[in-house]
Amino acid sequence: MTTRTSAAPARIEDHALLGNCRTAALAAPDGTVDWLCMPGFDSPAVFTSLLSDAPEKHGFWRVGPAVIDTAPPSADSRRYVGSSTVLEQTWHTLTGTLTVTDFLVAPDATGYAPAQLMRIAACTEGSVTVASEIAVRPGYGANTPVLRPVAYGTPRIQFADGADTYWLDGAFHFNLYGRHYAEEALEAGQQRVFALTWCAAGDPVPTPPTGLELDATLAWWEEWASACTYTGPYRDAALRSLVTLKAMQDLATGAFVAAPTTSLPERLLRGLPGTAAPDEEQEWRTWDYRFFWPRDTAWYVRAFLDYGFVEEALAWREWILTHTDPAALRPLYRLDGSTDTAERTLDHLPGHLGVARPVRVGNGADGQLQLDVPGELLDTLWEMELHGLPGGPDVVEYALRLALQVEQTWHLRDCGMWESRGTPQHYTSSRIWCWVALDRAVKLLRRYGAHLATAQRLEVLAVYVRITVREAGADPRRSTLTQVCGGTDLDASVLHALTTGLLDPADPLATGTVEAVARELGAGPFGLVERYPTHENAANIDGLPGHEGTFLPCTAWLASARALTGDTEGARESIEVLLGIRTDLGLLPEQADSLDRRHQGNFPQGMSHEALLAALLDLQAAQHSTAPRELALAQAAS
């Protein structure tokens, strides 16, 4: 027999996402689940070998063909089953064919999703010996749970870690150097059902799984996906992005995570799978994205609305109104609305591929001033009105308080939407979104006939902020908006001046900005777009040394901006660039290397999928000579 340790660590792009709207797991092609947080997205991981080079030490679970003195083989094929996050991987061995179906059990009729990972190994041809090898390591790999015997002769193991209990069902395991290993010979038509279930103190003992959970999970996802209204040429890509975003929602609270992982590095050294940092003395760009960002999730909700999904938007709005204070809006929250998000490092973990340190939990951006956030919130709240989902007096008062806060702060320096850890700046994109906040607040107040005198005052300020963007935030020599007011460097985030309506697409400043971003921030041979210029071994505006990968939403933003300016061919080319970055399963990371397209950063990344979805609709509108989404909705509502 062999263990997962004899195989090379899986690359970021090798992974599949499993999700059930409570937590998420990542599965590698050799049958290893190397990332799983239980019971929720932001809980400590029980399998953390994604951030390690020692799987047996930090947790993993492999189910696949049994092998002797060789590395576990990758599956010969894999796919998602229908419009779900159910993964099916198939191996063709010398003696037969084995298919392993992995999934997190979907929510029941009440919306409750169990913290349960199931793996069904089935022999479909000939005979195959299936192996299950598992090392449960709670606390991000820091804890080795206590093994408690269950009834003798039953295929069940109980792992106890403080108040948490993990039940492993499905095979007669024996202890192998701190891991648990089992083999079973299967003939054609036979299967073995495995499950790992988390229980809290006082929970009833879980019922052993039957395998029928698979049909219920598939039915849940298919029913949800049936609401999609998009029928364009990219339907498969759009639906996979929508399913991926949905899998990042915590159904119990309505909140979304930005990504289901932490500390996957934003840069890898090319050609060296076990290294990534340009300088071992430097800290890596490794961040924890398992939190609710009002900005990111506002964009997710717009995507759901535009593609025919309503419940996600209603749950998001309720979450925002319940858990956020317009006078003290934070960049990020825990999924339950609490604010215990302080950043710390897990020094016992060596990081992805064994080198990407530090591994972080929590996020240091939690205390930053980010002036763009009210704009994204009010933009989405306004769009919900246009979609026929009125918020009533609660939304009006919330919008008023947000706008009054913007009135007091719009002129300040901030950390910007990129959450810079450097010196605060007068970011042009922050000014753009401050204008959006004021503009949408005025629209909301007038729609309800509320606080009209205040609305008039805010409208005057919105005009002034817009002028400030055009004058202080532009380089007239190049006819482009710039990263900071009075600066010359570019930043792809200024493309939002077009997509939000601050600039008319026919305005020379708009077309000049699109051309400048494509020309000066374009990177590598594949047509990717960088966020902003970075420099090797020097402090950048973000306060961090060295380069990063290309942030994928920027390529989608360029596609949308090109579509709005009538360059449909350029928009299509940018979209095809993004589609080419996706994995074979249709997943997008946060970033990619501009030269070899290696995936970088947390995975999968919600904002990458949302930006692709927005670009697809903007291209469709431009190709059919229809109004952009905002204008079309406004006209429909008038």
Image (cartoon, grey):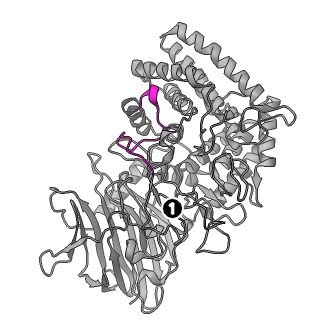
- For disc 1, the marked residue is 358
Please determine whether, in this image, residue 295 is positioned above or below residue 405: below
**Callout 1 secondary element:** loop
Please determine whether, in this image, residue 476 is positioned above or below residue 593: above
Which percent across, then down, holds residue 392? Answer: 41, 20
Q: Is residue 109 left or right of residue 496?
A: left
Which percent across, then down, holds residue 289? Answer: 48, 51
User: Which quadrant, please, contains the N terminus?
Assistant: bottom left
- Name the magenta segment's main secondary structure: loop
- What residue span does the magenta drawing correspond to? 324-343
Which percent across, then down, holds residue 461? Answer: 63, 16
Q: 372 or 413, which is in the foreground?
A: 413
**Which amino acid lies under the numbered mark 1 shown in the image of this protein?**
Pro
Please determine whether, in this image, residue 524 is positioned above or below residue 390: below
Q: 268 or 529, which is in the foreground?
A: 268
Membership of 75 in magenta stretch: no
Q: 485 or 599, which is in the foreground?
A: 485
